[in-house]
Image: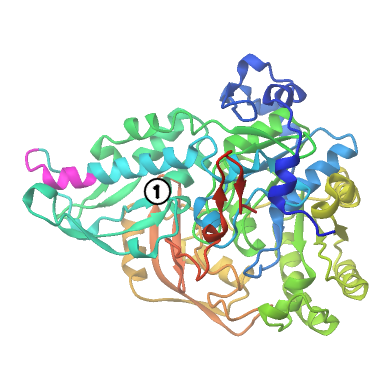
Amino acid sequence: MAFPSDLEIAQKAQLETITAIGQKLGIDPESLEQYGRYKAKLPLSLINEAKAQKSKLILVTALSPTPAGEGKTTTSIGLHEGLNKLGKRSVVVLREPSLGPVFGMKGGAAGGGYAQVVPMEDINLHFTGDFGAIEKSNNLLAALIDNNLQNRKRTLGIDPRTIAWKRVMDMNDRALRDITIGLGGTGNGIPREDGFNITPASEVMAILCLATGIEDLKQRLGNIYVGQTFDRKPVFARDLKAQGAMALLLKQAIMPNLVQTLEGNPAILHGGPFANIAQGVNSVLATKMGLSLGDYVVTEAGFGADLGAEKFFNIKCRAAGLSPSAAVIVATVRALRYHGGADIKEVNNADPGKVTIGLANLGRHIENVAKFGVKSVVAINHFPTDTAEEIELIKTYCKERGAEAVLSQGFAKGGAGMTDLAEAVLRVVEGGKSEFKPLYDLSLSIKEKIEVIAKEIYRADGVEYVGDSHAALNRIAKLGLEGLPVCMAKTQYSFSDDKALRNAPTGFRVSVKDIEIAAGAGFVIPILGEIMRMPGLPETPAAEGMDIDANGVISGLS
């Protein structure tokens, strides 16, 4: 019998009411803002800073992924199920899926197999409307900018050539990357070049995920850098009096979302910045909510540890005062084959030789996580094509580097297949072996911070500044933003800025082409190599296989 699809498993699940899920965390049903029977918003009043400091935070990250992904979300959910199987009061805190990947490559992003969050269809589609609110808030600022250009009586004198703010939509649409707006006559605005980013790349998304409350949210929104006037004075969103209305559109979106796993355990989903172009982690508020309501929080950071984990440690943990107790590095045999030289079409073919070569990639991630003072466990996310010999190679390699490697079978077995991993993680957590510290000091210059990451995490020989990066560095200095952390934007498929350099490359330099200012979020974004902030659909989009019948039954999600 064929293994059921993710959607088939999710559709057969017997869900508990969201009030029952809330009661497992001690939440009065009257406190929940319900979105139907199985979803709810959590009021920020439930956050207890003192309790949050006592709970244990576990980060799930990964080796450098293949284009198919390696299953961090599945592993995060499975580990949460496994901890609950062991009698621990655990909460999993994740990002919300973006419609871009759902209809593009992935087909869904709510976990997989028997390690999923549900209601899966709702989560993968519009959920509670957070992404729509972020999109509208972002685009309100864009409209206010163009209105100010048009309004000669109340103009700020913004130079249209310097406007850094783009519109967003939550869809992969390459035709919108570079556009011209304001055509059709004087009543239609000022003609200028513009473009769209995907919603998870919006600074509003980054701000929502770092804000500590409504007042902080408004201040951060007001700090958004828009561009310059003709006499080269900086213009911020607060100069357009935009922050109040922008925050108003986010009054529900700032509240974390409560759902459940297939085994009826609480799950919190909130925010969804990508890790290759943004910070790649869920919101500070969601994480603190989980730490307030549970004793253990399992959370994940996007793509490999060189991206999501680095930003989780250097940006989120620093900003929120978080101190993770352990990290889980997800590895797959097929990814190691890929890094060992296998073609993407051959990654399901057993090849111990290629696994042996590809282990260098995993080893580098283990070393990198240790540089933050965090002890890691390696989760071998199991696939049917794995062989016992290849699995043993991974376990031996990791043991030699001081990291226990454990077979992870949440996809096929749910929580029952994750208790071994849960026990290994608990050994690290309860042993108090982690002493978290950021990689760099904020007093360093922006160039120094970039070079620390490039050399320590990527293992680059150096950094080259090309194109608009020199002007950007001058602009950052003039704005007094040298003290901000950096949020690197680069390919997820390589430690370098060239996706073709797999495994653990050496002898390369990275190129910074530009540095975007995200003053509201509280970081700057160096652009390394070729990176897209508005993806395109693949040749065969996942959307082509999706449908809904007359009874409302959905097919094609995964």
Q: Where's the C terminus, which quadrant? A: bottom right
Q: How is the image coloured?
A: rainbow
Q: Which residue does the image show at 82% across and 62% down from the upper left?
A: 382
Q: Is residue 232 visible?
A: yes
Mark 1 lies on a secondary structure that is: loop
- On the image, the x and y values in percent for residue 43 come to 57, 24
Q: Which residue does the image show at 50% across and 33% down from the upper left?
A: 254
Tell me if residue 150 is in the magenta stretch.
yes
Tell me if residue 214 is in the magenta stretch.
no
The chief SS type of the magenta part is: helix
Q: Kindly identify which residue carries mark 1.
A: 519
Up-down: is 145 above or below 472? Answer: above
Up-down: is 447 above or below 373? Answer: below
| In front of the other: 531 or 515 | 531
Res 397 quadrant in image: bottom right
Left or right of residue 475: residue 502: right
Of the residues shown, which amino acid type is indicated by label 1? Ala
Left or right of residue 165: residue 135: right
Instruction: Tell me the magenta residue range.
Output: 145-153
Q: Which residue does the image show at 24% across and 39% down from the upper left?
A: 239
- On the image, the x and y values in percent for residue 284 come to 58, 39
| In front of the other: 70 or 148 | 70
Q: Where's the N terminus, which quadrant? A: bottom right
